[in-house]
Amino acid sequence: MASKRKSRRWLILLFLLVLVAASLGIFAQRNSAAPTVDAGSLVDVKREDIAVSVVATGRVEPISNRIEIRSKASGIVYQLNVDVGNRVVPGQVLVELDRDQLLAQLREAEANLQAAKADVIAVRAELERNRILAEEHDVQLARTNHRRSVELFEQKLISKSQFDETKGRLDEALNRQRAASAAIGVTEASIVQREARVAQIQAVVDRISEELKYTSIRSPIHGIVLSREVEIGSAVSSILTMGAGATKVMELGNMNEVYVRGQVNESDIGMVSVGLPARITVETYKDKTFHGSVYKIVPLGVQSNNVTNFEVRISVENPEGLLLANMSANAEIVLEEHRDALTIPEGAIVFEGDQATYVEVPDLTSETGRRRIDAEIGITTGTRAEVLSGLDEGTKVILQ
């Protein structure tokens, strides 16, 4: 009985010893383990290109040769040869106007011209006749005959009537000569007048012929049809008579050379200068980047909703013609760019006084589970920062 009691005491004692040892082990383990860092807050230091930039938002426009096509002739659109988006070359016929009325006017003018030329020929013939009459050939012949008749009459070889006849012929010849001489000046003036009439009608013929050429409206440039304002049957007025109020037929642009007309906030415009490179993206080609450069900064700002923006123009390479007029575009103007640089998220940087910066990395030997490393920071983009020294590629840093 005593031995059983003794065994029971030893078992209780052994159980208490095991329980105390287990408690001491758990307590020691809890006090020796360092705090851990959430894996979701760890990021790697990596190499990539990093750039500081200013964004200009705007639209794509042709950089040159954006022109409005207006007709030199008036008429009705008879034929349309191009539509919006079609490419055109110099001399290509874009629109044909109805020519029937002009052709009728041309036929009438040409008939008047022929009649005027015939009048000139007739008057010139009359002038030649007057010149012949004005010569003394007929007068000399009549005077010689009269002189002979005088001698014969004095010798009573001819009658008085025959004498009077030769005298009348001489007077008649003299009268014709005087009349012809007087008519020469009149006829010459008439020729000048009729030749002027010919020139006047010729000008009408030339003008109508030119207008007939204008009925074929041609492209003056290599480009693309940006817009078309007329349809078959539309009335078109001439720019020669209506000026700026003439009908706009279509608009052409050379889309091989385009630019982005963008707006930059006044807080950023001081950093932008001509010649800076730019990367352009458009909604149509989300995965494609176009390249260009700043070529003009408009000095006059425009205020809207209490915000002042400045117009910046960025020329864009468009060899494939993918960029079209009025496409919305974002131009990232690169102020400074470093390639293959070490970078970290800006959220991992801790700033101290005097612009000192450091980051924290995991450290299981530390009481806090993290360790501070001083890091020199270069350019920043607002989301990522360049690391100049203090960290190596692949190092894991803690987001704050």
Image (cartoon, rainbow, N blue to C red):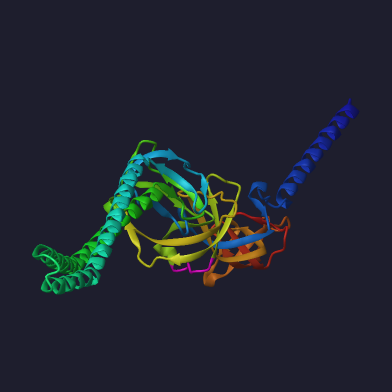
Secondary structure, magenta segment, majority class: loop
* Viewer-side residue, 335 vs 60: 60
Residue 108 % position (x, y): 30, 45
* Viewer-side residue, 282 vs 228: 228
Residue 49 % position (x, y): 64, 60
Residue 110 drawn above or below residue 199 = above
| Residues in magenta, as a range | 270-276
Q: Is residue 287 magenta?
A: no
Looking at the image, the residue that sits furthest to the left is 160
Residue 111 drawn above or below residue 343 = above
Residue 334 seen from this side = yes
* Viewer-side residue, 231 vs 11: 231
Q: Is 350 left, or right, of 129 in this rendering?
A: right
Quadrant that contains the C terminus:
bottom right
Looking at the image, the residue that sits furthest to the top is 1
| Residue 191 image-quadrant placement | bottom left
Q: Residue at x 50, y 64 (%)?
A: 294
Q: Residue at x 21, y 67 (%)?
A: 184
Residue 306 seen from this side = no
Residue 31 % position (x, y): 71, 50
Q: Is residue 274 magenta?
A: yes
